[in-house]
Amino acid sequence: MTVRTRLLDREVGRALSSVSAAAKRGLGDPALAELVVIRASQLNHCAFCLDMHLGVARELGVSEGQLDLLASWEEAEDVFDERERAALALTEAVTVLAEGSCRTRCTREPPRTSTTVNSLISSG
């Protein structure tokens, strides 16, 4: 764990906690809610969130197999049931930070590089 992953803007932290609590209430299944939050964290490249929610998921009894294959859940048909697959599909449909990763949007630190996706595309 790096210093960067321990630095989270308080307002961002409160907002993320509210979203997480709403997901848990809405899904009615804390373990499924953690799978959803973990997948969103993977998509947004947020090490802080991954570190936190992987621990919670393990405490709730989410299997290591599910955690190991979460990034490729669509191909792991026998690991996730229909409800889990639907929740993960919805998560992917609505979860993408518009610009940058959580590193650049959740902390007050600047990104480690000034290279952007647009500059990579335009230079190629």
Image (spheres, rainbow, N blue to C red):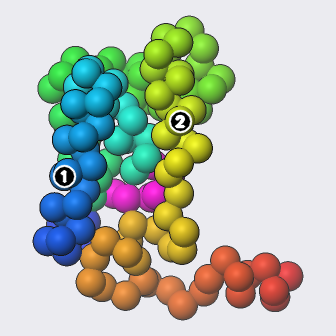
Give the residue displayed 44% in from the left and 41% down from the top: 39
Tell which of 75 and 17 is nearer to you. Answer: 17
Q: In this view, does 109 lie to the left or right of 71?
A: left
Q: Mark 1 points at which residue?
A: 17
**Quadrant where the N terminus lies?**
bottom left
The three-letter amino acid code for the residue at tag 2 is Leu
Mark 2 lies on a secondary structure that is helix
In the rendered image, the vertical position of residue 7 relative to residue 85, given as above or below: below
Name the spot of residue 65 as percent of width and height, x first: 42, 19
In the image, residue 57 sits, relative to residue 94, either above or below, namely: above
- What residue is at 43 percent from the left and 47 percent from the top? 40
- Residue 23 seen in this snapshot: yes
Say which residue appears at 24% left-offset and 40% top-offset.
Answer: 22
Tag of residue 73: none
Work out how far the residue at label 2 is from the one at label 1, CA to CA, in angstroms.
19 Å
Q: How crowded is mark 1: few (under 14 residues within 10 Å), some or many (20 or more)?
A: few
Amino acid type indicated by mark 1: Ser
Residue at 22% across, 61% down: 15
Q: Give the range drawn in magenta.
A: 42-47
Please tell me which residue lies in front, 10 or 56. 10
Residue 107 occupies which quadrant of the picture? bottom left
